[in-house]
Image (spheres, rainbow, N blue to C red):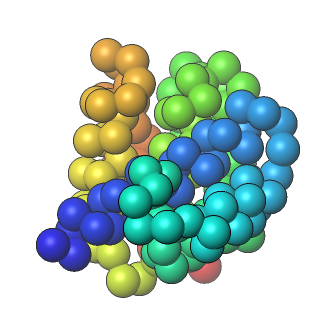
Amino acid sequence: MATSSRSKARRRALEVLYEGDLRGIDPLRVLADRVARTEEQTPQDSDPHIGDFTIALVRGVMEEIDRIDPLIETYSVDWTIDRMPVVDRNLVRLGIYEIIWSDDVPDVVAIDEAVSLAQELSTGESPQFVNGLLNTIMQLKPTLQR
């Protein structure tokens, strides 16, 4: 059950990051708007609840974005960050945040979750790209945390 709820929270975090990136606005503003909407909901409303894990992921990514994006630029092969599909860019941001800064999630789980979302939401090549980049980050983690 916990895995399922965390998977849903990751997906919601990805949606917030994606929306902010696509619209050119701060994802923290998107997050605040979604939290406000969910607080006004009745139990019958269909918009998903924004929970603590989703909030922590979005805030964490945005707090470390100036460290995350250079890692993406450095270690992504044949793709600049601006050329990546918006979904992929935000999936690897989320994955890198979880690998380097989130100690409560095993690295392989963060990678598996990101690859799964890439399979579901992005291009045919995206799962392999996301997997390769995040595995590189995981291998380099000890030197990146210094």
Residue sticking out furthest to the bottom:
104
Number of callouts: 0
User: Residue 60: in sight, yes or no?
Assistant: no
Picture coordinates of residue 83, whole percent (x, y):
66, 20
For this rendering, which residue is in front, 102 or 53?
A: 53
81 over 53 or under it: above or below:
above
Along the line of sight, the residue nearer the viewer: 116 or 15: 15
Residue furthest right in the image: 25
In the rendered image, which quarter is residue 144 located in? bottom right
**Residue 131 image offset from top left, x and y in percent:** 32, 40
Q: Is 23 positioned to the left or the right of 103 in the image?
A: right
Residue 112 locus on image (x, y percent): 25, 51
> In the visual, does 22 lie left or right of 89?
right
Q: Say whether residue 3 is left or right of residue 146.
A: left
* Residue pictured at 72% horizontal, 26% vertical: 82
Which quarter of the rendering shows the N terminus?
A: bottom left
Residue furthest to the top in view is 124
Q: Which residue is found at the position 34% from the left and 40% from the top? A: 117
Whether residue 90 sits left or right of residue 80 in the image: it is left
Front-most of residues 144 and 125: 125
Which quarter shows the C terminus? bottom right
- Where is residue 89 shown, x and y percent of the image? 58, 37
> Which residue lies at the image location 36% right of the left edge and 34% below the top edge?
118
Q: Considering only vertical position in the picture, is 45 above or below 19?
A: below
- Visible residue check, residue 113: yes
Q: Could you tell me which residue is drawn at 48 percent across and 74 percent down?
A: 51
